[in-house]
Amino acid sequence: MMSTSVTNSETPASAAPPVSRGFIPALEGLRGLVALGVLVTHVAFQTGFTQVPVLGRIVERLDLTVAVFFALSGFLLWRTHAGAARGVGPAQGAVRYWISRVTRILPAYWVAVAVVLMFLPTADGSFRTWWANLGLVQVFVPLTLTSGLTQMWSLSVEVAFYLVLPIFAFALFRLRGSTARLRVPVILAVIAVSLVWAFVPVPAPNGIHHENWLPGYLPWFGSGMLLAELSMSPPGRMHRWARHRVRMSIVAAVAFALTATDLAGPAGLVRLEPWQFAIKIVLGAVISFALMAPLVLSDRSRHRFLTSPGALAVGRWSYGIFIWHLAVLATVFQVFGLVPFAGNFAYALLLTTVMSIAVASASYALVEEPARRAVRRWEIRRSSAERPSGSTARPVATSATSSGN
């Protein structure tokens, strides 16, 4: 996401938003960490490690790292709208928003889909699978989440959120200035209403579960949107409580422990009861909020681990890790003669992690970064062409927060 960070000079220092910067390095490191969490839970499942008592259940629940991905998107994409409502810089324009989303998501994703469907022996290369995956509508089309690409259901949901976000921003446009304080209650209300989604008997094709559509996951995006609103609001009691790292770590740990019980559904890939799905969604939102709050509400811009060079590098490559790791895992099983669900968790995890990072770094260098630079050059040329004749003003350089937003 490309964003502009401007401080309102007329706002008293005591009432200034706690965070009004653009790129937050710790979020980049967090994104890399949760990408590895997704990888770990998939390796654990494919090797049968999730069947190990206690520890297997805990590792299986690392699937909730997807909640953090969604919350990161909610925060980063909503932040300029929250700031604009309070006079902290302009909201991102619609054209730039769509260009940034398309540039960030599609080039590397389409390459991954094409390579997997053409070269992975276990992938379904039917025409229906091709168009559903290229169009990111897998969650609506039965039997199109094929080998090497099953994780893309979450990207399909994320793209649906991208489409809805401008509509939601327009709906809250009038809540500005003195009424901006009402934006948080409105977002909370939407989150609360969305929790009934799993209970609604929505007709869907055989093999499609409507819980996996966007409304079911709005609380995860909403937790990031709430943080965006708080980050652009004057400091208050909630800021002082939520920016405390130890306190928030305890909250996240307790919520995660609860997800490892039957409250959030039984072990394995089974369809949850509506009440279990709702509890899992709530706990995922709490975990995401607790992990991110100290990073975005604190006035400290550094985090010893998350801003280390290694963590930032993995964060930079996290999108590639996400889109490639299942294809890499399938290749690891074939090349190294591993039998699915028959153990070798540590060995498969090591090989998959190393190879996924290598492929992701290549994806970033050969596809993602060249695409971003090409679009940036195009924007600069367009900005130069639109400047009045004789103007000496230079195009404003914008930075894109990497790894998906």
Image: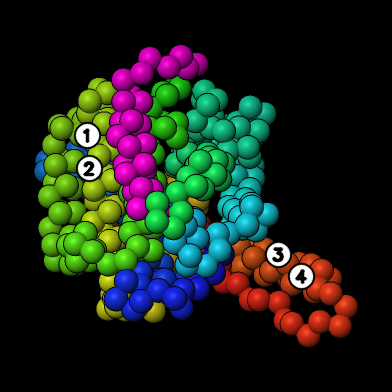
Mark 3, other Cα within 10 Å: few <14 / some 14–19 / many ≥20: some
Question: What is the span of residues highlighted in magenta in the rendered image?
Answer: 180-206
Q: How many marks?
A: 4
Q: Earlier in the sequence, mark 2 or mark 4?
A: 2
Q: Mark 4 is on which residue type?
A: Ser
Q: Mark 1 is on which residue type?
A: Ile
Q: What residue appears at the point 52 percent right and 23 percent down from the top-left corner?
A: 142
Classify 392 as above or below 333: below
Mark 4, other Cα within 10 Å: few <14 / some 14–19 / many ≥20: few
Q: Are marks 2 and 1 in contact (CB under 8 Å)?
A: yes
Q: Is residue 202 magenta?
A: yes
Q: Which residue is mark 3?
A: 375
Question: Which image quarter is the N terminus in?
Answer: bottom right
Q: Earlier in the sequence, mark 1 or mark 4?
A: 1
Question: Quarter-wise, where is residue 356 in the image?
Answer: bottom left
Q: Are marks 1 and 3 in contact (CB under 8 Å)?
A: no
Q: Which secondary structure, mark 2?
A: helix
Q: Which of labels 4 and 3 is toward the front?
A: 4
Q: CA separation, marks 2 and 4? A: 45 Å
Q: Which residue is mark 4?
A: 383
Where in the figure is residue 184, as x and y percent of width and height?
A: 34, 48
Q: Mark 3 is on which residue type?
A: Val
> Position of 131 compared to 139: left or right?
right
